[in-house]
Amino acid sequence: MKPAPFEYTAARSVAEAVAALARGGEEAKVLAGGQSLVPMLNMRLARPSLLVDINRARELDYIREADGAVRIGATTRQRAFERWASSQLPLAAEALSRVGHTAIRNRGTVVGSLVHADPASELPAVLLCLDGSVVARSEQGERVIPAGDLYVAPLTTALRPGELAVEARLTLPPAGAGWGFAEVARRHGDFALVGSIAVVSLDQSGRVVRARVGFFGVGATPARGSAAEAALMGQTPTPTLIKDAARAAAAALRPDADIHATADYRRRVAAVLAERTLIAALARCGRAA
Ligand SMILES: Cc1cc2nc3c(=O)[nH]c(=O)nc-3n(C[C@H](O)[C@H](O)[C@H](O)COP(=O)(O)OP(=O)(O)OC[C@H]3O[C@@H](n4cnc5c(N)ncnc54)[C@H](O)[C@@H]3O)c2cc1C
């Protein structure tokens, strides 16, 4: 199938992109890496009347680390960030290694994946677990949308018509924090059936002082495992505590059934993966990344 007709404009700057988006209103869509949008156009699942291509806006191609956070511009390719993250943020590198295949990551953008908001995507759950945010720019100005407020429904974010996501921000885990990542997919590179992330910090006496547990593929949006985080805080982790915490977090999930897996399967696997990611995170605590 071929896309429905649309107007196309190649913005050379954020200002040009934002002006074009204001002109197009609800009928306009941003074209970043095109790895999700172009198939949707071809299948006529998306029928924008205006495409605003941001690939020539060079000011959006950057990875900047400052004040304990990393900022990623909207045209930064997933593969470029994966390379940076392999030494600086191994959790993100591990998550990115599961996003499709290298050819897709060479073109797909980090910000595009975050705002495309596929519930089975890896990066939105990373954004949640690293207390991240997305910066949105429009003709009305700029606002920062925390990850917890960004995800509204499948393929739907809090971004408004006319807004361009210009940057993603991830808080770097504190020194000595441990991380774990696990997903179940039919084949390497497929979207996850179920996935889990954990980031944990311990104090000198081995008690949990910070815990983030996240899930993807198990509901309409990525989710934090707040029950597990609360159960672990201030405790010295034992195998029983970890198992119970993981189960409590999974019990709060509301996964959907589809042709790939039942809701019950997803919830059970989520408990197992959360336990594994917590064990991996705790094993890494105190070690250099
Ligand atoms: C075969 C295949 C396998 C894949 N497997 C996975 C996988 O396992 N995991 C995974 O997470 N992803 C997977 N993907 C999707 C891939 O990661 C995409 O790159 C990503 O979802 C979208 O990024 P993009 O830059 O290509 O965005 P585009 O396709 O250009 O845009 C996607 C959507 O986001 C909007 N958008 C993009 N950038 C902005 C912006 N700056 N501001 C406002 N709106 C914006 C667009 O308007 C569009 O609605 C796969 C894709 C393919 C083709």
Image: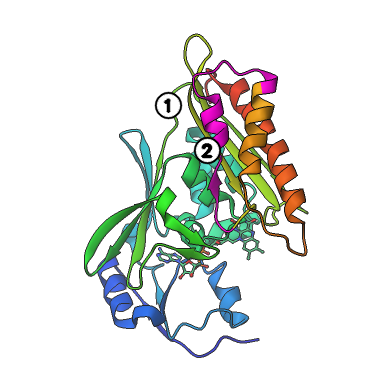
Q: Position of residue 23 (x, y in %)?
A: 29, 82
The residue under the point 62% across, 48% down is 253
Residue 25 appearing in the image = yes
Pointers 1 and 2 in contact (CB under 8 A)? Answer: no
Residue 218, relative to residue 153: is it above or below? above
Total numbered circles: 2
Q: Horizontal placement of 252 versus 22: left or right? A: right
Front-most of residues 42 and 26: 26
Q: Position of residue 195 (x, y in %)?
A: 65, 46
Q: Horizontal placement of 170 versus 18: left or right? A: right
The region drawn magenta spans 220-240
Q: At label 1, which amino acid type do we have?
A: Pro
Residue 22, relative to residue 206: is it above or below? below
The residue under the point 61% across, 38% down is 249
Tell me if mark 2 has few (under 14), some (14-19) or many (20+) residues whose alpha carbon lies within 10 angstroms of its own.
some
Residue 86 appearing in the image = no
Residue 226 highlighted magenta (yes or no): yes
Tell me if mark 1 has few (under 14), some (14-19) or many (20+) residues whose alpha carbon lies within 10 angstroms of its own.
few
Residue 223 highlighted magenta (yes or no): yes
The residue carrying mark 2 is 226
Q: Quadrant of residue 274?
A: top right
Q: Quadrant of ligand 1?
A: bottom right
Front-most of residues 157 and 271: 271
Image quadrant occupied by the N terminus: bottom right
Q: Element under label 1?
A: loop
Residue sticking out furthest to the left: 140
Residue sticking out furthest to the bottom: 5
Q: Horizontal placement of 27 versus 1: left or right? A: left
Indicate which disc residue 174 carries.
1
